[in-house]
Image: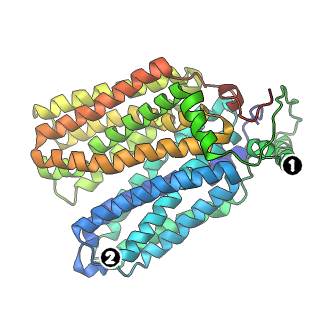
Amino acid sequence: MDRLPWSRFHWLVILGLGTVWILDGLEVTIVGALGSRLTEPDAGLGLTTADVGLAAAIYVAGACLGALGFGYLTDRFGRKKLFIATLGLYLLATVATAFAPNPLFFFVCRFLTGAGIGGEYAAINSAIDELIPARRRGVVDLAINGSYWLGTAAGALLTVVLLDTNLFPADLGWRLAFGLGAVLGLLIFIVRRTVPESPRWSVIHGRDEDAEKTVSDIEGRIEKERGEALPPAEGEMKIHQRKSTGFGEIISVLVRKYPKRLVLGLSLFIGQAFLYNAVFFTYALVLTKLLDVPDNIAPYSLVPIAVGNFLGPLLLGHLFDVVGRKIMISTCYIGSGVLLVGTGILFDNGALDAVTLTICWVTVFFFASAGTSAAYLTVSEIFPMETRAMAIAFFYAVGTGLGGIIGPILFGRFIEEGVHSVVIGYYIGAGLMIAAGLVEVFLGVAAERKSLEEIAEPLSTAA
């Protein structure tokens, strides 16, 4: 798979698997932007302000549990079965949310939607990395993970229209928002059904014929597309095939065999979780409460920030394959942390208004987004194939749990206390990013342009 030239097949993988991050960005942004509308009596749901916060926490809990549960199942039963199942769950839950008649039904739907999205992270990242050639794995992964912010920008603009009661009744606009997410998910589902199972997973799990057929089909399509024969495959590896990998063995691999890589993954995910919550949980309130920006204008500031988050991975992604993972990840983490410290100093001294503060955030996240997107790439690459999906799920759950639970509690209090306390929140996020960047300097893995088996030998390798 690593020797294959870039082709229409690889674009199919990106379209069928990678576009789901747009859905996640859309989901998170829509619910945040719709929060005030859902508390209005005319919305027909009867939520309180506390209920909106509870719904967000329930979504996070669903994402964490879904990632862990579906991550384990992805390693056990295959990438394709699970990336079909998780998207199917998302579709059903999102459609049901649009018809929610009461708070309890809404909460259940939010939990199931989160579970589907959380499961997607494990199933999709593992499948993409096992199907994309090694020489382009970095740029592809970063661009795909960065596409989350396209969904964020779309969600911010979409909700402005759907919340306009001159266009849609108060009890209809928010329901249409969830319905549109389901329509996009359905289109992705149709394409995704044509993406094959990972041959790497198949051969390790005793499905040699399936693996051979998949690779032959892909090679045949590429040879027909290019009009020439492909060079023969080189190298070999002997393995002991297995039906499954036990949960205990997965934990043992993370803790005993790769403890330094475990520390690396935790550092990268904890750092990015607090950085993003330091700004994104507070940005609208900072603008409206501290800088007197009107409530109907503040949501638009998310669009340039989201664009900066998307452009970072897109424009810097190729450097992660050329310059190297360690240099680029550490530079992006440390650089964004230093930039946020500078932003905090200027903000604390009253030197920034709404426009210049937003420009600072765009600059910070241009670099931070490239680094944090590479965090998902890192934990997918540096552990054995049999544990790949579970490793992604574990680190995603840790980062999402910290960001979605501790972050809102901590930074909510900072906002109540004023500008100086908000700046302290910025410093905490920046400090953790810089620390994670330093961990990358000492413990990072030079995985660029290497096969996954070379980075982390499969557990099934024969002695």
* Residue wearing tag 1: 213
Compared across the picture, whether 445 is left or right of 212 comes to: left
Q: Where is residue 371? Give x, y as percent.
A: 45, 32
Tally the marks: 2
For disc 1, the neighbor class at 10 Å (few under 14, some 14 to 19, many from 20) is few
Name the residue at 33% across, 33% down: 363
Compared across the picture, whether 390 is left or right of 342 comes to: right
Badge 1 marks a residue whose secondary structure is helix
Quadrant into which the C terminus falls: top right
The three-letter amino acid code for the residue at tag 2 is Leu
Q: Nearer the viewer, residue 267 or 279?
A: 267
The three-letter amino acid code for the residue at tag 1 is Lys
Q: Which label sits in the foreground, 2 or 1?
A: 1
Q: Is residue 377 visible?
A: yes
Q: Where is residue 90? Give x, y as percent.
A: 53, 64
Name the residue at 43% across, 70% down: 108
Query: Relative to 333, is 306 above or below?
Result: below
Query: Relative to 62, is 162 above or below?
Result: below
Q: CA distance from mark 2 to mark 1?
A: 53 Å
Query: Relative to 298, is 274 above or below?
Result: above
Coloring applied to the structure: rainbow
- Disc number for residue 167: 2
Q: Nearer the viewer, residue 285 or 273?
A: 273
Q: Where is residue 364? Give x, y as percent.
A: 33, 33
